[in-house]
Amino acid sequence: MSTTQTGDTGIADVDATGPAGGMGPPKTARGQKTREALLRAAEKVFGEKGYYAASISEITQEAKVAMGTFYLYFKDKEDIFRALVAHMLELVRAYLRKHVAAAETQMEAERLGLKAFLSFVSRHKNLYRIVLDSYSVDETIYSSYFQVFAELYSRRLTRAEEQGEIVPGDAEVRAWCLIGISNFLGMRYARWKRPPSMEKVVDTAFDLIAHGLQPRQTR
C-alpha cells in the first residue's frame, strides 16, 4: 500500500507546530473571527510594508477593530508576526492536504504537491516577504518554519522508501532539496513573474525530480 493510500499525505497530515505566537485560541466564535481578521490584516500590512515599517495601528485599521482589541489577542507586534508565520504554515499544510489527497503514489504526490504549492503562493504572494522578514526579526522563527516542513517531508519520504515507491537515499537531504525546488520556483514564477504556462514549469520540475539530469538511455 502506498504512503498516500494510507491517508497520509505528508506535510499536511502530521501534527506539528511551527513558530508560535499569540495568547492562546479564543474561547468564542466571535473571538476567533476577530483573531482571524487581525491575522489577515497583518498578512496584508506586513506583506506590503515589511515588518519594521509596519505598525499595530495599521493592522487594526485594516482589520477594522479598535487598538485595545488587538491586545486581547496579541502582546505586541512581534507576537502577531510570530502567530502570522505559524498561521501561514497551517494554511500551506491545509492547502496541500486538500490537493494531494487523491495521490496514490509518492511520485504522484510530488507532482500534485508542487502544483498546489505554486498555486498557493500565487494567491498569497505576501508569504515570501513575511517568511523572509522573519529571518531578521528572529532567526528561530525562520528556521522553525522550514524545519517543520523538512521533518514531515523526511518522514513521508522514509515511508515511501520502505514501501518501495522510491529508491533508497538520505530522506533528510532529499527533503531539503525538494523544499528548495518548490520554494525558489514559487519565488520566481509565482511572485516575481508568472510564466505563460505554470503547467510547463511543474512538468519540467517534476521531470527533474523523477529522472534527474543524466541522459536517459534509448532502446
Image: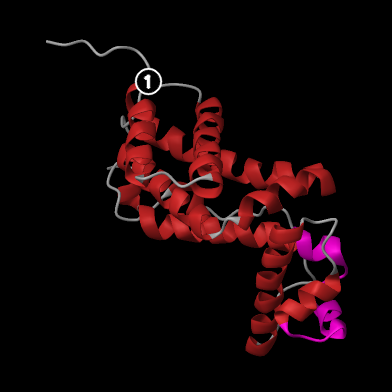
* Location of residue 73 in the rendering, given as x and y in whole percent from the top left corner: 79, 76
Q: Which is more toward the observer, 204 or 211?
A: 204
* Residue occupying the point 57% across, 44% down: 149
Q: Which quadrant holds residue 28?
A: bottom right
Q: Is residue 67 left or right of residue 42?
A: right
Query: In this picture, which residue range is highlighted in magenta?
Result: 64-82
* Residue occupying the point 86% across, 82% down: 67
Return the residue at label 1: 212
Q: Is residue 211 left or right of residue 151?
A: left
* Location of residue 25 in the rendering, given as x and y in whole percent from the top left corner: 71, 75
* Residue occupying the point 31% across, 29% down: 164
Determine whether the residue tagged by mark 1 lies in a helix, strand or loop.
loop
Model colouring: secondary structure
Q: Which quadrant holds residue 132?
A: top right
Q: Is residue 207 magenta?
A: no
Q: Is residue 160 left or right of residue 144?
A: left
Q: Is residue 67 magenta?
A: yes
The amino acid marked with disc number 1 is Gly
